[in-house]
Amino acid sequence: MKLLVPIDGSRASINALKKAIEIAKKYDFSMTLMTVVEESHLTGYGRNQNFWHQVDGSIISVGVAPEMVSKVEEGAAEFLDDIAAAFDFTGINLEKIIVTGKPSIEILELAKNEAFDLIVMGNRGMSKIKRFFTGSVTQRVIAEA
């Protein structure tokens, strides 16, 4: 059986990881830790994207320099390595995955493509106001999983 645990560093995601470790050990799950690098959070990306939409209303994509994405992905790999070192995964077959994109979409895509049996994730991460306007990643995953 396969267990997917999206991690973003928030207290809620760490608490979800602790519960996922308990589940994996009790029911003999393999576990995949996943983190998503969001291009829209990289410096200047969102600003440039908005600029082009204001200029001509087109769907021109400015893009992000591959070096920048690579550096952020390296940081994400170190983050997952730190998580793996900080918790006891004894007896759990552990895999770590880093993807770039929109978290809810990437989580759902990986869960479907890799046939995960269970997704364990935190239920908070952003303020109530931001969640009202954008919806939470967890809510989207629950609605579409």
Image (tube, rainbow, N blue to C red):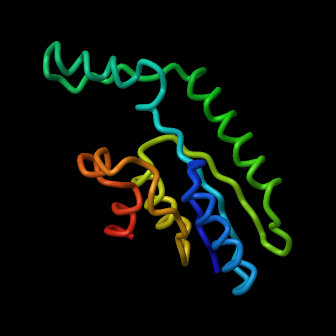
Quarter the N terminus occupies: bottom right
Residue 44 occupies quadrant:
top left
In the figure, 16 relative to 59: above or below? Answer: below
Residue situated furthest front in the rendering: 128
In the figure, 34 relative to 102: above or below? Answer: below
Residue 67 rendering spot, x and y as whole percentages: 60, 20
Q: In front: 101, or 24?
A: 24
Residue 102 rendering spot, x and y as whole percentages: 41, 45
Quarter the C terminus occupies: bottom left
Residue situated furthest right in the rendering: 90
Q: In front: 130, or 39?
A: 130
Residue at (74, 52) in percent of width and height: 83
Residue situated furthest bottom in the rendering: 27
Residue at (53, 39) in percent of width and height: 37
Residue 104 occupies quadrant:
bottom left
Residue at (75, 80) in percent of width and height: 25
Residue 77 rendering spot, x and y as whole percentages: 70, 41
Residue at (50, 65) in percent of width and height: 111
Residue 69 rendering spot, x and y as whole percentages: 56, 28
